[in-house]
Amino acid sequence: RCLIPPAIYKSACKIEVRDFPFDQQNCTLKFRSWTYDHTEIDLILLSDYASRDDFKPSGEWDIVSLPGR
């Protein structure tokens, strides 16, 4: 079993502002290996939700939830 240390990942998601200012966005992140297939690696989620501790509040938006599956 190999533990990968925590890291910071940056992403960009397409947004839909049709219902602005009451819109909600969904950004799905998928993690996989570029060097191993599913028979050689097993990614295990350690928690059902991500922590908001490292997020800085914004006056323009709010994080509603951070589920993991």
Image (cartoon, grey):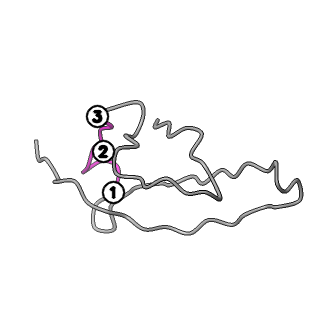
- Residue annotated with mark 3: 46
Question: Would residue 12 appear left or right of 69 to someone viewing this image?
Answer: right
Query: How many residues crowd around disc 2 within 10 Å: few (fewer than 14), some, or many (20 or more)?
Result: few
Q: Earlier in the sequence, mark 1 or mark 2?
A: 1
Gap in angstroms between the C-alphas marked 2 and 3: 10 Å
Q: In the image, what residue occupies the spot 40% across and 40% down?
A: 50
Residue 29 percent location from the top left of the image: 50, 55
For residue 39: magenta? yes
Label 1, label 3: how many angstroms apart (C-alpha)? Answer: 21 Å
Res 56 quadrant in image: bottom left
Please name the residue shown 28% across and 34% down the image.
46
Q: Residue furthest left?
A: 1
Q: Secondary structure at mark 1?
A: loop
In this figure, which residue is indicated by the disc labeled 1? 37
Magenta residue span = 37-45
Marks 1 and 3, the one that precedes in the sequence: 1
Q: Which amino acid, by three-letter code, is at mark 2?
A: Leu
Seen at 47% across and 54% down, the residue is 30
Q: Residue at x 11, y 47 (%)?
A: 2
Q: Nearer the viewer, mark 1 or mark 3?
A: 3
Q: Is residue 26 magenta?
A: no
Element type where label 3 sits in the image: loop
User: Label 2 near label 1: C-beta < 8 Å?
Assistant: no
Find disc 2 in the rendering and name its residue.
43
Q: Which sits in the foreground, 20 or 43?
A: 20
Q: Main secondary structure of the magenta part?
A: loop
Which marked residue is nearer to the observer: mark 1 or mark 2? 2
Q: Quadrant of residue 58?
A: bottom right
